[in-house]
Amino acid sequence: MAARVARDIPEGAYVNLGIGLPTKVANYLPMDREILLHSENGLLGMGPAPTPGEEDWELINAGKQPVTLLAGGSYFHHADSFAMMRGGHIDICVLGAYQVSTRGDLANWHTGEPGAIPAVGGAMDLAIGAKQTFVMMELLTKQGESKLVEACSYPLTGLRCVSRVYTDLAVFEVGVNGAKVIEIIDGLDISALSNLAGLNLCKQGQSDA
Amino acid sequence: MDKSITSAAEAVADIKDGASVMLGGFGTAGMPDQLIDALIAQNVGDLVVINNNAGNGETGLAALIKAGRVRKIICSFPRQIDSHHFDAAYHAGKIELELVPQGNLAARIEAAGAGLGAIFTPTGYGTLLADRKETREIDGRSFVLEYPIHADFALIKAHRGDRWGNLVYRKTARNFGPIMAMAAKTTIAQVSEIVPLGSLDPEVVVTPGIFVQRVVAIPQASGTLA
């Protein structure tokens, strides 16, 4: 999944990878492309983790893990960092999700369970700020329910902000025209995928009729 | 003009019960631990704290919460693997939480420092965190009205400073320091070193001294865990 997302990130892109699953995309970025990673705590041009013993705890990523800075990278304060997102300067952000709706609504910050301490961080700014928001998630929950849905039942992070959803079974385009299947894994067809997702799906470029 | 103060205790001595206090730092990077220790030692409470998180581990903000000094926290990401002191206080009903998306937190702090009356932000529109807030459509896009966050004090950590209050930071420890310095009535910076006037390159000064009222030198090794 991470490798599939990485393939779609072009040369010269400024990219923010969310905490969790999306972080793995960094391991698959093609070496022949210069792609700059943004971390919302205040760095652009984020490099890989330092070698053990070389950690600097004033050089960390949004997940508060030690990282490095590439030559040409820069540091900045939080208002500038979020201006990069909200101002539409970040090309792509890749986020995890509890649910995505077929029109691109995102739910990824709060389960809404009573007693759960809510925490949002930069998720809402990222979701609506980047030029393109990609979601990376397993298509089904452990209980077999689709996380691509007609309407999110979890509290929303942002409205109509997701353009593409990468899952273990298929890649979808989502938006005003609903969900279209861009790619599907071998051995699965549209009707089987539609059954699993509980949605009436069609291939990209085909109408719903 | 000399803003340098000899001790952390002296620098925070006029912070009283009920004060609103911005604390720099993202996690532990940029957290002004020694200023917070001084605050804990002088026994003030009922504080309203503004920080991105709600304390990590045992130091800094976590220690302040553990000591029962925080009435309310305004932050974006309280729940973390090592936020046990906040978690306990929250579940015991001993601390009030105002959750703000991280970019709105930064923008509201910056707005206070810049003297703006409010901002319209797209972040949070249509979500629980904009519930019952005023909205407006501008150029076809939906925005939420959010007000500035002011504070009586900001306690921040920078790398080097001079006696006029000019500051430079170190790596990602910069985070909220520059905007909190602008937003608080009184900004107190702890720095690793106070250097003579003119030795900070004016082209790279990040926080001009006008935003800083007190500077305290707290020598420590850079990048080590506090």
Image (cartoon, helix red, strand yellow):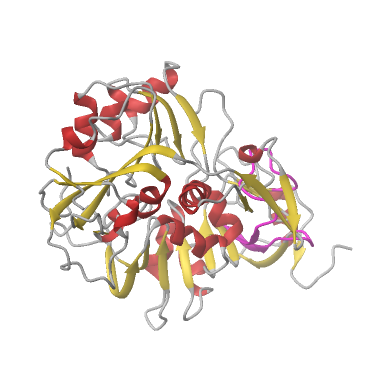
Q: Is residue B69 left or right of residue A123?
A: left
Residue B40, by quadrant, is top left
In the displayed orientation, state which residue is furthest to the bottom: A32
Q: Is residue B28 left or right of residue B10?
A: right
Rendering coords of residue B154 (x, y %): 34, 41
Rendering coords of residue B50 (x, y %): 41, 37
Q: Is residue A42 above or below residue B186?
A: below
Q: Residue at x 27, y 30 (%)?
A: B14
Region in magenta: A149-178
Q: Is residue B99 above or below residue B104?
A: above
Rendering coords of residue A197 (x, y %): 69, 49
State the quadrant of the C terminus of chain A.
bottom right
Residue B170 belongs to the span the image colors magenta: no
Residue A160 belongs to the span the image colors magenta: yes
Q: Is residue B168 left or right of residue B194?
A: right
Q: Is residue A117 visible?
A: no
Q: Residue at x 84, y 67 (%)?
A: A207
Q: Identify the main secondary structure in magenta.
A: loop
Q: Nearer the viewer, residue B119 or A87?
A: B119
Q: Is residue B149 above or below residue A63?
A: above
Number of numbered tags placed on the structure image: 0
Q: Is residue A116 visible?
A: yes
Q: Nearer the viewer, residue B43 or A157?
A: B43
